[in-house]
Image: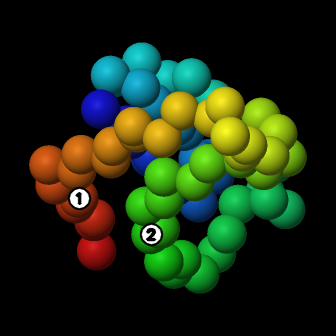
Amino acid sequence: MYSVDWRPDHVTFSLDGTPVWTLTDPQHIPRVPLPLILDLGVGGAFCGAADATTPNHAQMLVDWVRGSP
Protein backbone atom coordinates (compact mmCIF):
# COMPACT_ATOMS: atom_id res chain seq x y z
CA MET A 1 0.00 0.00 0.00
CA TYR A 2 1.31 3.41 -0.96
CA SER A 3 0.43 6.50 1.04
CA VAL A 4 1.21 10.21 1.07
CA ASP A 5 0.95 12.28 4.25
CA TRP A 6 0.75 15.89 3.04
CA ARG A 7 1.03 18.52 5.77
CA PRO A 8 1.99 22.22 5.73
CA ASP A 9 5.55 21.46 6.93
CA HIS A 10 6.28 18.14 5.21
CA VAL A 11 5.17 15.53 2.67
CA THR A 12 5.99 11.91 3.52
CA PHE A 13 5.66 9.03 1.06
CA SER A 14 5.25 5.55 2.57
CA LEU A 15 5.14 1.98 1.31
CA ASP A 16 3.32 -0.60 3.43
CA GLY A 17 3.36 1.80 6.39
CA THR A 18 7.11 2.46 6.22
CA PRO A 19 8.18 6.02 5.32
CA VAL A 20 10.49 5.94 2.30
CA TRP A 21 10.93 9.63 1.50
CA THR A 22 10.09 12.93 3.20
CA LEU A 23 10.09 16.38 1.64
CA THR A 24 10.64 19.23 4.12
CA ASP A 25 11.72 22.17 1.94
CA PRO A 26 8.80 24.64 2.26
CA GLN A 27 9.47 25.98 -1.24
CA HIS A 28 8.63 22.56 -2.69
CA ILE A 29 5.53 21.75 -0.64
CA PRO A 30 2.39 22.71 -2.59
CA ARG A 31 0.01 25.07 -0.79
CA VAL A 32 -2.97 24.39 -3.06
CA PRO A 33 -4.97 21.21 -3.68
CA LEU A 34 -3.55 19.06 -6.49
CA PRO A 35 -5.30 16.38 -8.57
CA LEU A 36 -4.49 12.74 -7.94
CA ILE A 37 -3.25 10.93 -11.03
CA LEU A 38 -2.94 7.15 -11.11
CA ASP A 39 -0.71 6.14 -14.01
CA LEU A 40 0.92 2.94 -15.18
CA GLY A 41 3.40 4.58 -17.52
CA VAL A 42 5.97 2.59 -19.46
CA GLY A 43 9.27 4.06 -20.61
CA GLY A 44 10.45 7.60 -20.12
CA ALA A 45 13.53 9.20 -18.60
CA PHE A 46 13.52 6.99 -15.49
CA CYS A 47 14.07 3.62 -17.14
CA GLY A 48 14.40 4.40 -20.83
CA ALA A 49 12.10 4.18 -23.81
CA ALA A 50 9.97 1.09 -24.36
CA ASP A 51 10.87 -1.14 -27.32
CA ALA A 52 9.96 -4.54 -28.76
CA THR A 53 11.65 -6.32 -25.81
CA THR A 54 9.66 -4.45 -23.17
CA PRO A 55 7.23 -6.80 -21.37
CA ASN A 56 3.65 -5.60 -21.65
CA HIS A 57 1.87 -7.55 -18.93
CA ALA A 58 1.71 -4.87 -16.25
CA GLN A 59 -1.49 -4.25 -14.32
CA MET A 60 -2.57 -1.51 -11.95
CA LEU A 61 -5.00 -2.87 -9.41
CA VAL A 62 -6.59 -0.15 -7.30
CA ASP A 63 -8.71 -1.29 -4.39
CA TRP A 64 -9.61 2.20 -3.15
CA VAL A 65 -8.42 5.78 -2.99
CA ARG A 66 -9.15 8.01 -0.03
CA GLY A 67 -8.44 11.67 0.46
CA SER A 68 -8.79 13.86 3.51
CA PRO A 69 -10.69 17.13 3.32
The label on residue 36 is 2
Taking the image as shown, residue 49 lies to the left or right of residue 13, namely right
The quadrant where residue 29 appears: bottom right
The quadrant where residue 46 appears: top right
**Residue found at the very far front of the displayed protein:** 52
Give the residue at x 48% y 59%: 39
Colour scheme in use: rainbow
Which amino acid type corresponds to the residue marked 1 in the rendered image?
A: Val
Would you place residue 2 above or below residue 29 in this image?
A: above
Measured as percent of width and height from the top left, residue 63 is found at 14, 49
Q: Is residue 1 something one can see in this rendering?
A: yes
Asked whether disc 2 touches disc 1, contact meaning CB atoms under 8 Å apart, the reply is yes
Label 2: which secondary element:
loop
- Gap between marks 2 and 1 measured at Cα: 9 Å
Front residue of this view, candidates 55 and 58: 55
Taking the image as shown, residue 57 lies to the left or right of residue 29, namely left
Give the residue at x 85% y 62%: 27
Would you place residue 37 above or below residue 57 in this image?
A: below
Give the residue at x 47% y 68%: 37
Say whether disc 2 or disc 1 marks the residue closer to the N-terminus: 2
Label 1: which secondary element:
loop
Measured as percent of width and height from the top left, residue 56 is found at 48, 41
The label on residue 65 is 1
Give the residue at x 22% y 50%: 62
Is the residue marked by circle 2 packed among few (<14), some (14-19), or many (20+) residues within 10 Å? Answer: few
